[in-house]
């Protein structure tokens, strides 16, 4: 039987939708029957295990799964011997310290002698050690934001993205212990066949990521300023330039990265570009 790469992803929760979508965007069909914890992709040699995210680093270290998708926060907390191969750009959050809205946090020293509730005792202890602080850690597995309000702790360390959970519970974010996003991790001892499958998958993941970070741009440029406009547009090799039916004008096609996008568009307009169309890219193979 041909070997399959075994991937562990979260069964349900914050990373589930994006993990399945990433595989779909890579052209891999994942059929997840309700409550089915294991499935096989139809068009790629991939077997998918649906697990609690906390367990994924251990499964990958033990080689029960070859690769996994999990938050960096969990990878660092669990401290398993796995290799992070690719950041995935979703599940972005931060592990932050929060205290009561009226508390006067002055810096890490504020935590000296205090009680801290968290689901991340390892990362919190490391933060305390790095800052030379002694404090009492209360490990709880969820609903951490409730702890100060019910007298269980003076401060918490928990995941934050919009900050609305903290706000709803009368807390404020005062310091960040770790910034995190979902990553692809792998077992350290994959054989050649598995490594080749991983390379195929990674190639697809990188193409999908690149496409998300870039836009296809089409615009009309006056020929008398074409050189200046082309200089603003690097493109994958160089921009495509086609003559328009109207004399004196050209159609210019190119690719712009998301982070430079608005800057370049403003400069293009200033250089006389008109009818600028911006189109999402589905895959980008370089
Ligand atoms: N508010 C958030 N915004 C963005 N990403 C988040 C947020 N909260 C958590 N994450 C990321 O998603 C991961 C999974 O979060 P989730 O809350 O679903 O975990 P969980 O409750 O521990 O799930 P499980 O049942 O699998 O143990 C976290 O480890 C983190 O990497
Ligand atoms: O800053 P916010 O956008 O409010 O997000 C923060 C919340 O998100 C996560 O919980 P989640 O909603 O995933 O629930 P869970 O802890 O029950 O898994 C995290 O544990 C926080 O409680
Ligand atoms: Mg969990």
Image (tube, grey):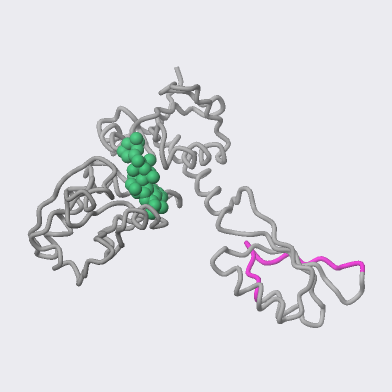
Q: Is residue 239 magenta?
A: yes
Residue at horizontal 35%, vertical 30%? 51
Say which of 206 and 71 sits in front: 71
Q: Magenta stretch containing residue 216, yes or no?
A: no
Please state, as top left, top right, bottom left or bottom right, where the N terminus lies in the image. Answer: top left
Q: Is residue 158 visible?
A: yes
**Residue 239 in the image: x percent, y percent?**
70, 66
When the figure is inspected, residue 155 is found, relative to residue 52, above or below; the finding is below
| Residue drawn at (13%, 68%) of the image | 109
- Expressed as whole percent of the image width and height from the top left, the position of residue 31 reads 53, 26
Which residue is drawn at the image coordinates 58% and 36% (left, top)? 27
Q: Which residues are magenta?
A: 232-245
Residue 185 visible in the picture: no
The quadrant of the rendering that contains the C terminus is bottom right
Left or right placement of residue 162 versus residue 216 in this view: left
Left or right: residue 95 versus residue 197 is left
Residue 160 placement: quadrant: bottom left
Examine the residues drawn in magenta and state their main secondary structure.
loop
Seen at 18% across and 54% down, the residue is 124
* Residue 117 on image: x %, y %: 19, 50
């Amino acid at each position: 039987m041909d070997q399959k790469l075994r991937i562990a992803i979260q069964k349900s929760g914050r990373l589930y939708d994006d993990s399945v979508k990433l595989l779909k965007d890579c052209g891999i069909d994942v059929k997840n029957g309700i409550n089915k914890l294991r499935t096989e992709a139809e068009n790629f040699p991939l077997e998918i295990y649906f697990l609690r995210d906390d367990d994924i680093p251990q499964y990958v270290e033990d080689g029960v799964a070859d690769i996994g998708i999990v938050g960096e926060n969990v990878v660092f907390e669990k401290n398993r011997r796995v290799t992070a191969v690719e950041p995935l750009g979703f599940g972005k959050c931060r592990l932050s310290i929060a205290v009561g809205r009226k508390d006067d946090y002055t810096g890490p020293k504020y935590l000296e002698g205090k009680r801290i509730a968290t689901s991340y005792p390892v990362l919190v202890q490391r933060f305390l050690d790095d800052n030379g602080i002694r404090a009492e850690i209360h490990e709880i597995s969820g609903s951490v934001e409730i702890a100060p309000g019910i007298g269980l702790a003076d401060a918490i360390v928990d995941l934050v993205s919009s900050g609305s959970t903290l706000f709803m519970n009368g807390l404020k974010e005062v310091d960040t212990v770790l910034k995190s996003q979902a990553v692809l991790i792998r077992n350290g001892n994959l054989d050649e066949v598995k490594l080749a499958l991983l390379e195929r998958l990674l190639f697809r993941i990188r193409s999908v990521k690149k496409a998300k970070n870039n836009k296809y741009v089409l615009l009309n440029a006056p020929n008398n300023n074409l050189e200046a406009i082309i200089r603003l547009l690097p493109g994958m090799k160089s921009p495509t330039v086609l003559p328009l039916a109207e004399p004196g004008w050209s159609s210019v096609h190119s690719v712009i990265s998301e982070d430079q996008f608005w800057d370049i568009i403003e400069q293009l307009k200033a250089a006389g570009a008109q009818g600028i169309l911006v189109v999402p890219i589905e895959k980008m193979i370089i």
